[in-house]
Image (cartoon, rainbow, N blue to C red):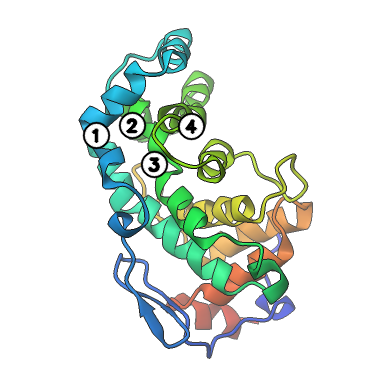
Amino acid sequence: MEVFNPSLYSIGLNSNIQLNRFGKNVYFGQNPIQDSFQSTSPVKLFNENEIKKMISQNTDIKKLLSENKIPIRLNMTELKDLAQHHCKDTQEIAASIANNLPQSLKQQVNIKNLKDGAMLHDFGKVLIPAEILNKNGALTPEEHKIMDLHSELGYQLLKNSGVNDEILKLVRYHHDNKQNNFVPDINLQILNLADKYSALTEERVYKEAFSPQKALTILYSEVKKGDIHPFIFNALVKSIQTKEVPQIVNKY
């Protein structure tokens, strides 16, 4: 695999943008922004009773679970952990990517929908069995099939909850996007990349956290295949202000 060479891109190492990977502040220019789920999406959606109501109001959810032999069991612990860590992290990365886009692309971004979609993109994992979510090892093909249902389950759970259509699209298609996909939406492409970068650089039960360099190398291969828009990738590179960034640049 070709190692990502940041000299091909314009990396603003001296910018004021700082991405805090541990849930505190994100700085855009000189303005500190403290963001939280409470300020961007209805808190009630992460409530167990509300989720039970969503299931009772949508027969398609029970049908989907039944067809795939998934028991109706809410994994609230996993959902709340996702909200506090991966989803929050993805939200911050997505917002920072959006902020670093060229102006012509930035104007196409709906930042409110993007941030809400990032917080809700893995909502459907509340119905994925914990033994699959937390498996310490490779998933079987059948387990992969079940895991892949979380996007559709999230959409089905949220579609009658007052969430707007743009956010629902982000939840439903956040794993399906490619640069030339049938849903060529800038918000979707940003969320797709932010989700991938967050997942790669997080420690999980089945893998260690990848360094920013390794994560960017993996993602750069997708840029070359046309699966990630180069301008959106470049915006991610600009946004990364962790200690590893100078090491990446100085290596070349």
Residue 218 pos. (x, y %): 62, 56
Tell me how far mark 4 sits from mark 3, CA to CA.
Answer: 26 Å
Q: Is residue 120 left or right of residue 234?
A: left
Q: Mark 4 or mark 3: which is in front?
A: 4
Q: Is residue 12 above or below residue 106?
A: below
Tell me how far mark 2 sits from mark 1, CA to CA.
Answer: 6 Å
Q: Mark 2 or mark 3: which is in front?
A: 2
Identity of the residue drawn at 42% across and 40% down: 122
Answer with mark 2 or mark 4, whichever residue precedes in sequence. Answer: 2
Tell me how far mark 2 sits from mark 3, CA to CA.
Answer: 19 Å
Q: Is residue 233 left or right of residue 119?
A: right
Q: Which residue is mark 4?
A: 155
Marks 4 and 3 in Cβ contact (< 8 Å): no
Mark 2 packing: few (<14 Cα in 10 Å), some, or many (20+)?
many
Q: Given the image, on which type of amino acid does mark 2 rest?
A: Val
Q: Given the image, on which type of amino acid does mark 4 rest?
A: Tyr
In the rendered image, the quadrant that contains the N terminus is bottom right
Q: Mark 2 or mark 4: which is in front?
A: 4
Q: Nearer the viewer, residue 184 or 206?
A: 184
In the rendered image, the quadrant that contains the C terminus is bottom right
Q: Which residue is mark 2?
A: 126
Residue 88 pos. (x, y %): 36, 56
Q: Which residue is mark 1?
A: 76
Identity of the residue drawn at 64% across and 72% down: 101
Answer with mark 1 or mark 3, whichever residue precedes in sequence. Answer: 1
The quarter of the picture where residue 242 lies is bottom left
The quarter of the picture where residue 249 lies is bottom right
Q: In terms of secondary structure, where does tag 3 sit?
A: loop
Residue 170 pos. (x, y %): 55, 44
Marks 1 and 3 in Cβ contact (< 8 Å): no
Q: In terms of secondary structure, where does tag 1 sit?
A: helix
Q: In terms of secondary structure, where does tag 4 sit?
A: helix
